[in-house]
Image: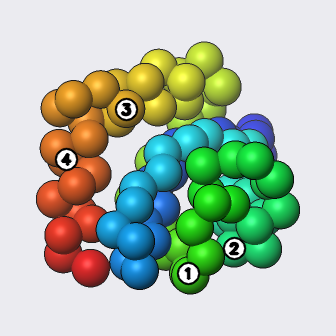
Amino acid sequence: MPSMYSVYAIFNPKYKKIYIGQSKDLENRLKLHQERTFKNSYTSQFNGKWILIHKEDFETRKEAIIRERQLKSYRGREFIRRLADQK
């Protein structure tokens, strides 16, 4: 089975913050966000739980990066914000 890359959006309900990223190992990446492992990163600035609100899988990193950029655009953020508002 080929490796998959995931584009994901996480939401911190305490601060109403969203983070969009991509990873080859989503489960581990989410754990690192929860543990605030990434010092001086966006997600480490906010305590509280980060919850996964959106995930898409891609066969190549190139495809994942393209989709990540789309989700970080104005229209993409509107889509993700609507998902976060449901939480």
Q: Residues within 10 Å of mark 4 (few under 14, many from 20)?
A: few
67 on left or right of 16: right
Q: Position of residue 37 (x, y in %)?
A: 83, 62
Residue 59 is left or right of residue 87, and the answer is right
Task: Say what amino acid the circle numbered 2 marks.
Answer: Gln
> Could you tell me the amino acid type at mark 4?
Phe
What's under tag 3, amino acid-wise? Lys
Which dot marks residue 65?
A: none
> Crowding near pointer 3: few (<14 within 10 Å), some, many (20+)?
some
Residue for point 41% across, 80% down: 14
In this figure, which residue is indicated by the disc labeled 3?
A: 72
In primary-sequence order, the first of circles 1 and 4 is 1
Q: Which residue is mark 4?
A: 79
Q: How far apart are the alpha carbons under marks 2 and 4?
A: 23 Å
The residue wearing badge 2 is 34
Q: Secondary structure at mark 4?
A: helix
Q: Sequence-wise, which precedes: disc 4 or disc 3?
A: 3
- The residue drawn where x is 43% and y is 24% is 69
The answer to which of 35 and 21 lies nearer the viewer is: 35
Q: CA distance from mark 2 to mark 3?
A: 21 Å
Q: Position of residue 34 (x, y in %)?
A: 69, 73
Q: CA distance from mark 2 to mark 1?
A: 6 Å
Q: Earlier in the sequence, mark 2 or mark 1?
A: 2
| Front-most of residues 33 and 6 | 33
Amino acid beneath label 1: Lys
The residue where tag 1 is placed is: 49
Q: For the point 22% across and 55% down, which residue is it?
A: 81
